Amino acid sequence: MKTLKIAIQKSGRLNEKSVELLKNCGLSFENYKSSLISPVSNFPLEILFLRDDDIPEYVQDGIADLGIVGENVIQETEVEVSYLQRLGFGRCSLKIAVPNAFDISDLSELNGKAIATTYPVILGKYLKEQNIQADIRTISGSVEISPGLGLSDAICDLVSTGGTLKSNGLKPFANVMSSEAVLIGRSGSEHEELVKELIQRIQSVLRAKETKYVVLNVHRDNLQSIIDLLPGVKSPSVVSLAEEDWVAVHTVIPERDFWDKISQLKQAGAQGIVVMPIEKIIL
Ligand code: PRT
Ligand code: ZN
């Protein structure tokens, strides 16, 4: 029996969401912090728990068939892997930031300046594209304290809320790249069918997350205007109610325009609107 291997972060910002995604795919496994490999009992899959920096190479070299890792790590390690699916978590941006007192208005003002980063490859390419000659200082961590220590004029680091920059007296200046967690694989994997099956499961979970299941009651006179507002998966289900003139409409609504849609439905005569989360959508 073939066994697929997927590499995920052992601990850190992507671990919890990666485990949650796989569990939502119906995969049953133990998430022991001490183990490096966890077998899945109901799918031919093993989960490898690794440092995120090692995941792209493990996938490239065929030690793992799949991996979940930030795009920033893939770009920095410059490996040959295929992007199979964006996962919508671990979102952040790699930014150049400068001390608040540095009154910068143009990227060219970074010419001849020292920029500290743990992302020398991505930063190097960006500066080259922008035609900036700066001194890239590669350090292994705590990049945000380097201007305060006099080690650099600017930094290039990941930002999500911006709180770390702020508390270190820094301001973001240029966006070098935006990143999120992605599922990666290798072309020509010998387990193509299993990979396909797992991707389908992941996509059904992601799709469900983006949509809500909605049930509402409406008078028959207003039914058509409600239907016109609902794109749905195909067309909405319309169910008779004990009260003859009224029906219940069952449909799905995308999360992104959810509140707009609900207020339009109310205006069109919808009543008793019930909203439920969806576990999976299989097309
Ligand atoms: O041990 P291992 O090597 O596996 O983990 P790690 O320490 O290298 O990575 P980890 O767990 O910190 O991050 C894993 C991945 O999460 C990164 O590669 C990104 O793809 C993603 N991610 C999302 C982030 C952030 N948001 C983030 N904010 N990674 C790091 N940060 C750090 C940033 O470096 C800075 O120190 O958080 C700080 C800034 O956060 P804000 O919210 O103050 O802006
Ligand atoms: Zn790391």
Image (cartoon, rainbow, N blue to C red):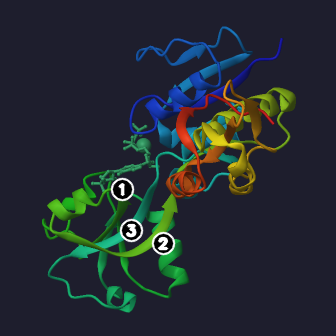
**Tags 3 and 2 touching, CB below 8 Å:** no
Q: Residues within 10 Å of mark 3 (few under 14, many from 20)?
A: many
Q: State whether label 2 is within 8 Å of ligand 1.
A: no
- Residue pointed to by mark 1: 160
Q: Is residue 93 above or below residue 21?
A: below
Query: Which residue is nearer to you in this view: 62 or 33?
Result: 33
Local SS, label 3: strand
In percent of the image, x 74 and y 15: which residue is there? 44
Residue at x 29% of width, y 76% of height: 114
Q: Viewer-proximal residue, 46 or 153?
A: 46
Q: Earlier in the sequence, mark 1 or mark 3?
A: 3
* Label 3 to label 2: alpha-carbon separation: 13 Å
Q: Image quarter for residue 117?
A: bottom left
Q: Residues within 10 Å of mark 1 (few under 14, many from 20)?
A: few
Mark 2 falls on what kind of element? helix
Q: Return the residue nearer the eye: 259 or 91.
A: 259
From the Cβ of disc 3, is ligand 1 less than 8 Å away?
Answer: no
